Image (tube, helix red, strand yellow):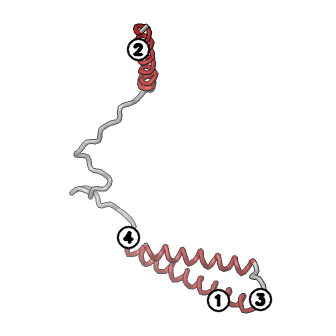
Amino acid sequence: MPESRRHLLMTLVTAAGFLAANPLFLSPQTPQPIPSPNAPGRNFPHRIGDPDPTGPDAKAIDKQNQVEIRTDIQKLFDLVSELKEQIEKTDANSTLSVSVVKKAQQIEKLAKQIKDRAKN
């Protein structure tokens, strides 16, 4: 009896091993090239003799960013003024109209855009 159990156990272990290793044999894996340790990466500065990397001018971006912030602030001021006028016209005891809520959402969205642009 122990011989048949041992035979059954060995058959099960062999089958489990074959099933576990089967995906390794069936999937065609192409070897990945190993990058050269001497090859320059994207984060490395350029070498002597290489052409200078061209990119956007930081000062021009800052000036353009400041102009956009100023125009957005003017838009924000206009929206807040309109909202104030609408609030003054409505009754204090009544509920706010949909236009007032939408105007407030526009103000919030524009203020967030200005804040995000100012962080950069």
What's the CA distance linking mark 2 and mark 3?
Answer: 84 Å
Residue 103 occupies quadrant: bottom right
Horizontal and vertical percent for residue 49? 22, 56
**Which comes before the other along the chain, label 3 or label 4?**
4
**Amino acid type for the residue under numbered disc 1:** Ser
Identity of the amino acid at label 2? Met
Which one is closest to the eye, mark 1 or mark 3? 3
- Disc 4, SS: loop
Query: Of circles 2 and 3, which is in front?
Result: 2
**CB-based contact (under 8 Å), mark 2 and mark 1:** no
Sequence-earlier tag: 2 or 3: 2
As drawn, 38 above or below 46: above
* Disc with the residue nearer the chain's start (2 vs 1): 2
Q: Which residue is mark 4?
A: 57
Earlier along the polypeptide chain: callout 1 or callout 3?
1
User: Can I make out residue 74 in this image?
Assistant: yes
Residue position for label 3:
93
**Residue 10: mark in rendering:** 2
Residue drawn at x 41%, y 16% as measured from the top left = 14
Task: Give the left or right position of residue 97, taking residue 74 as reference.
Answer: right
